Image (cartoon, grey):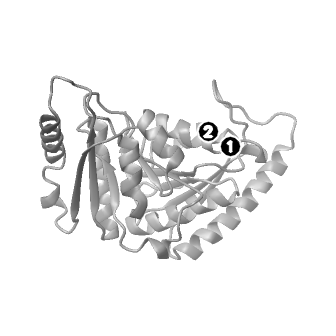
């Protein structure tokens, strides 16, 4: 991959309609961030556990040629979406999970579809998106195959789960940055449950409001043009996030978080959002 002053947005491409939806979303984001776009097609065979290996017993040269064809078509699609992008491509001999995790160390974000053809057209890209969400070194965007065209998103807001955890704070930072670049607002969601019987509902509600206010502190000064809608509710976090996202263009959550208040993270909550969302999901991850 060529060296650029700005880290690229990386997109996993397998030729499926879902991966092309992810590509269009990534191209629009690259244009907003004014950063390069790097398209990756993996020809290795992915495995769930252990190292990924190159395909054995098949014509590797033919697979690479097919990959180049897929990437050429993908690059054309990206340029139709955002004409002036700096685009590079790679056909990788290893599996998608290994390649994308490795490349994520120097990326702005990695973008994949929720599912696709997989390597050789027989494995789900969904396993790749789940692995990336847990192990990537940068934020991971997962684009559902129900994503609406860009022209239909308009000024829809960004929904972010706020739980006060370090990764939750990363999610807040990302949500405000994405909202500011898209000139839209943020819906900040904090939920709580009746887990602590010795604390009244009113006290839990007040503590949740205080936690959210502390988590959002300073954002109004840094992002004066981003309108914030606060949602603090007794509810299951995934259910409330999905409800608030019905008229949103993006959901942002952390990759893991805290106990106490319901964490807006990639545990059971994030998995539920990942499998049910109808809008793009951006999972906050950093280089640890």
Q: Which of 3 and 140 is in front in this view?
A: 140
- Horizontally, residue 77 falls left or right of residue 102, namely right
- Horizontally, residue 26 falls left or right of residue 97, namely left
- Disc 2 and disc 1 in contact, CB within 8 angstroms: yes
Q: Which of 143 and 99 is in front in this view?
A: 143
Q: Local crowd at mark 1 within 10 Å, few (<14), some, or many (≥20)?
A: some
Disc sitting over residue 90 in the figure: none
> In the displayed structure, would residue 95 be above or below residue 252?
above
Q: Local crowd at mark 2 within 10 Å, few (<14), some, or many (≥20)?
A: some
Q: Residue at x 12, y 41 (%)?
A: 206
Using the rendered image of the protein, determine whether residue 5 is visible from the camera's viewpoint. no
- Horizontally, residue 268 falls left or right of residue 219, namely right
> In the displayed structure, would residue 94 be above or below residue 219?
above
Using the rendered image of the protein, determine whether residue 83 is visible from the camera's viewpoint. yes
> In the displayed structure, would residue 157 be above or below residue 288?
below
Q: Nearer the viewer, residue 76 or 242?
A: 242
Q: Image quadrant of residue 45?
A: top right
Q: Where is residue 211 in the image (x, y as percent from the top left)?
A: 16, 40
Q: What element carries label 1?
A: loop
Q: Residue at x 78, y 36 (%)?
A: 55
Quadrant containing the C terminus is top left
Q: Which residue is drawn at 54% across and 38% down?
A: 130
Q: Residue at x 70, y 67 (%)?
A: 73
Q: Distance between the residues labelled 2 and 1?
A: 6 Å
Q: Where is residue 174 in the image (x, y as percent from the top left)?
A: 32, 52
Q: Is mark 2 on a helix, strand or loop?
A: helix
- Residue indicated by mark 2: 127
Q: Position of residue 251 (x, y in %)?
A: 39, 53
> In the displayed structure, would residue 45 be above or below residue 87?
above
Q: Position of residue 187 (x, y in %)?
A: 28, 57
- Horizontally, residue 282 falls left or right of residue 165, namely right
- Residue indicated by mark 1: 124
């Amino acid at each position: 991959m060529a060296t650029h002053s700005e880290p690229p947005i990386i997109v996993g491409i397998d030729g499926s309609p879902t991966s092309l939806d992810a590509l269009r979303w990534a191209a629009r984001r690259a244009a907003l961030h004014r950063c390069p776009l790097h398209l990756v097609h993996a020809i290795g065979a992915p495995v769930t556990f252990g190292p990924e290996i190159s395909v054995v017993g098949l014509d590797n040269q033919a697979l690479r040629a097919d990959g180049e064809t897929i990437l050429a078509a993908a690059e054309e699609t990206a340029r139709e979406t955002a004409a002036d992008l700096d685009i590079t491509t790679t056909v990788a001999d290893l599996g998608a999970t290994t390649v994308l995790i490795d490349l994520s160390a120097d990326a702005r974000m990695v973008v994949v579809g929720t599912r696709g053809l997989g390597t050789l057209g027989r494995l789900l890209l969904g396993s790749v998106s789940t692995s990336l969400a847990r192990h990537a070194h940068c934020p991971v965007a997962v684009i559902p195959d129900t994503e609406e065209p860009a022209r239909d998103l308009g000024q829809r807001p960004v929904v972010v789960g706020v739980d006060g955890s370090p990764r939750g704070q990363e999610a807040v930072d990302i949500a405000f940055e994405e909202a500011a670049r898209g000139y839209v607002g943020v819906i900040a969601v904090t939920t709580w449950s009746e887990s602590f019987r010795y604390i009244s509902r009113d006290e839990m509600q007040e503590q949740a409001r205080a936690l959210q206010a502390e988590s959002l502190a300073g954002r109004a000064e840094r992002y004066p043009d981003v309108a914030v809608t606060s949602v603090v509710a007794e509810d299951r976090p995934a259910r409330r996030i999905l409800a608030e996202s019905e008229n949103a263009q993006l959901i942002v959550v952390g990759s893991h978080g805290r106990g106490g208040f319901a964490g807006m993270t990639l545990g059971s909550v994030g998995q539920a959002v990942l499998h049910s969302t109808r809008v793009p999901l951006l999972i906050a991850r950093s280089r640890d």
